[in-house]
Amino acid sequence: MAPFAAPDVLVLAGGGVLGEAWMTGVLAGVEDATGTDLRRVEAFVGTSAGSIVAARLAGGRSPRRPSDAHSDAEPPGADGRAGSSAVREALRSAGAAAWAGTAPAASAALALGAPGGALVRAAALARMPTGARRLDRLHEHVRRWGTRFDGRLRVCAVDRRTGRRVVFGAPGAPPAEVADAVLASCAIPWVFAPVKIGGREYVDGGVWSVTNLDAAPAGRDTQVLCLDTIAGLDPRTRKMAALRGAFRVAAELETQLLRRRGARVRHVAPDAAAADAMGHNLMDPAGSDRVLAAGYRQGRALAGGAA
């Protein structure tokens, strides 16, 4: 394994409840092994579950450690429950089968934004029944963090009408509040209601790409760390093997685009212990603490620290 280099840019992919827990654990482990403060990296790119992790960091909040998994220090919601549960509830409520359906259905080239890909997506989204469920608790949870688009945070979503990716926070993107953009990035099309921003409807950024690595603001010698939950899916079932294969090809193509710009990309999937902790259902909140701990150990090992 190559020596660990502190990232300039963090790319945080989709992955449901357990993906959020794994990414959070890895980042905490890296911080503790290196003394690096990942809240201070130059840029964050987040998609779906990864947009929640990215918004948290950009808002100045450190990633959770296994020791404080049950004491996230978030204020309670209107129903009196701890705010930290809002993330788990929002991500799990879609169900694993619905989340998996956000995978790019055509070739990897479509995941990179070929014009035909946008047309295919737009047509599919137009035919798809619109979800009715809302993510209001998650919106309030993210809003309380006070995160703003300050040039560092980028949140990926898809314009429902055109099928094209929109990277909120990037130059030229439509103006948006961070909480609205995060909700849009998590809005699985046929499960959750599209999120309206500036009169347009947006849905889950995973419809375009699970990583959106190519949206990273990276140039020559930029160090990019991408955490990709789906690359560690258990391939023993035919469905999981197909999903992992499709996502892996897309991520490899996106990685090559960054490397052509001169960036140094480290693409990290869950290791064997973390993948085993996740199991088959990325939406099962019962495994969150176990996955957080496995991610933490992996992060320390990745950075060269003790397990």
Image (tube, grey):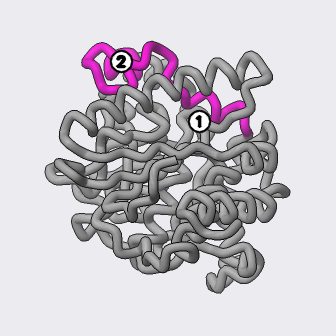
Q: Is residue 35 left or right of residue 289?
A: left
Asked if the residue under mark 1 is in contact with the one under mark 2, i.e. CB atoms within 8 Å, the reply is: no
**How many other residues sit within 10 Å of disc 2, few (<14), some (14-19) or many (≥20)?**
some
In the image, residue 71 lies at what x, y percent? 73, 83
Decide whether residue 184 is among the magenta residues: no
Which secondary structure type mostly characterizes the magenta part of the structure? helix
Q: Is residue 153 left or right of residue 15?
A: left
Q: Nearer the viewer, mark 2 or mark 1?
A: 1
Q: Residue at x 34, y 68 (%)?
A: 41
* Above or below for 166 versus 241: below
Q: Relative to 172, does residue 69 appear above or below in the rendering?
A: below
Q: Quadrant of the C terminus?
A: bottom right
Q: Quadrant of residue 40?
A: bottom left
297, 92: nearer the viewer? 297
- Which label belongs to residue 182? none
At a point 53% along the width and 46% down the height, the residue shown is 268
In this figure, which residue is indicated by the disc labeled 1? Answer: 231
Q: CA distance from mark 2 to mark 1?
A: 18 Å
Residue depicted at 37% across the width and 19% down the height: 110
Kind of residue at disc 1: Ala
SS class, disc 1: helix
- Tag of residue 109: 2
- Percent x, y for residue 36? 44, 76
Q: Is residue 98 magenta?
A: yes
From the top left corner, tell me how far across and down residue 156 is, in percent. Answer: 38, 46
Asked whether the viewer can see residue 140, the reply is: no
Would you say 120 lies left or right of 241 here? left
Query: Label 2 is placed on what type of residue?
Result: Ala
Is residue 39 something that shows in the picture? yes
Residue at 44%, 22% in the rendered image: 126
- The magenta span reads 96-121
